[in-house]
Image: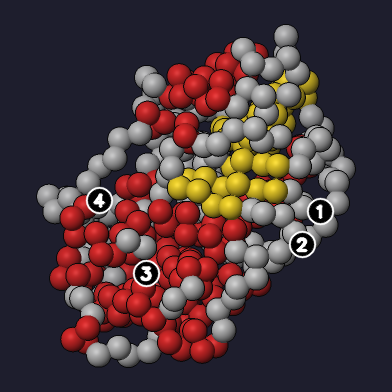
Amino acid sequence: MQPRQLPLFAEAPTRPFNYPFPTTRYQGSKRTLVDWIWNAVGNLSFDSVLDAFGGTGVVSHMFKNAGKRVVYNDILRFNWNFALALIENRSVKLCDEDVELVLSHTPSAQVSDFIQSTFRDIYFTHEENAWLDRTVYNIDHLLSDPYRQALARFALCQACIIKRPYNLFHRANLYMREARVERSFGNKVTWDTSFETHFRNFVREANAAVFDNQKPNSALIGDALDTPTDFDLVYIDPPYLNERGIGVDYHDFYHFLEGLVDYDTWRDRVDFRSKHRRLLPARSPWNNAKTVLEQFRLLLDRHRHSIIVISYRSNGIPSRDQLLDVIRGFKHRIHEASLPKQYVLSRQKSHELLLIGS
């Protein structure tokens, strides 16, 4: 039985709220696809949503705009902070006094130099590293409200991402910013813009994304297979594995951000043998071509009573047909939506897939 094809441009049900999600250069973000996703699922009957691999929180934020009760989950602490700030948070924003407090010059005797000493000449300049050490200290010690801390961490992490070549932390490549050469890629103006300026801009964007949809939304941190059950709809967007079995390892790509939001334990988790000072590896069965299909089966079994929405790519592992076979083991009605997509840093064209089982 072939799944029913959803029309590419179905009429979207109206979302009662329209708060914009902040701009981000986070790899794999669905920010440009949320309207397409809503077109595909908006006519389904559901009030509660679990976003099992929440990432930046942009899809959770879309469901929050739709007036749904949203539970966000992700295994990475910095992503969880994003969701605390923008999904669970109903009304707390950073005021001007908060921002000035975060950016204040704390006496250096109180501030660790961990970033300066550990990441010298790797990602940012020495002056920028010193700014990061001080700013993280101020967020952790001068802001008492957890949502204010989360908003500040969101802005700080986005500022770090936007100042990085490729927007990643997978290589020690500060030299790319500093080389005096003609460039065919990248944005040197963005790279050279001060952290403080980027931080202030992202604070404004984050504040504009905070709202109350009158539902008790929450943010969780943990394995997708440990998530609570009994949701009307479960949205599943795991790390992508390409046809060669090479996965998107967010723990490795964004290890620096994971350290920033858990600064006091960072030193104990750094792999000092690696040139770019990544965190000690954390292997995931979702990033293994031999085990990922079984992970899908286990997750769908856990949420067998919910509408299932899987977001994936047409040229990934598992294949489309394998995923459809798994869904058929739990659901009788299957719909499919497909959207051609060219991805940054990839020469191959593929299709974004939504596989919906109900």
Which residue is denoted by mark 2 in the rendering?
18
Circle on res. 279 = 4
Q: CA distance from mark 2 to mark 1?
A: 7 Å
- CB-based contact (under 8 Å), mark 2 and mark 1: yes
Left or right, residue 245 beside residue 1: left
In the image, what residue occupies the spot 70% across and 42% down? 48
* Disc with the residue nearer the chain's start (4 vs 1): 1
Circle on res. 15 = 1
* Disc with the residue nearer the chain's start (2 vs 4): 2
Q: CA distance from mark 2 to mark 3?
A: 41 Å
In the image, what residue occupies the spot 59% across and 42% down? 51
Question: Tag 1, which secondary structure?
Answer: loop
- Amino acid beneath label 1: Arg
Q: Residue 309: percent from the left, percent from the top? A: 65, 32
Q: Residue 27: percent from the left, percent from the top? A: 48, 50
- CB-based contact (under 8 Å), mark 3 and mark 1: no
In the image, what residue occupies the spot 17% across and 65% down? 118
Question: Tag 4, which secondary structure?
Answer: loop
Which residue is denoted by mark 3 in the rendering?
182
Say few, some or many: other residues with alpha carbon within 10 Å of mark 4 (under 14 / 14 to 19 / 20 or more): many
- CB-based contact (under 8 Å), mark 2 and mark 3: no
Judged by depth in the image, the label closer to the viewer, 3 or 4, is: 4
- Amino acid beneath label 4: Leu
Judged by depth in the image, the label closer to the viewer, 2 or 3, is: 2
Image coloring type:
secondary structure
- Amino acid beneath label 2: Asn
Q: CA distance from mark 3 to mark 1?
A: 46 Å
Q: Residue 4: percent from the left, percent from the top? A: 78, 21
* Disc with the residue nearer the chain's start (2 vs 3): 2
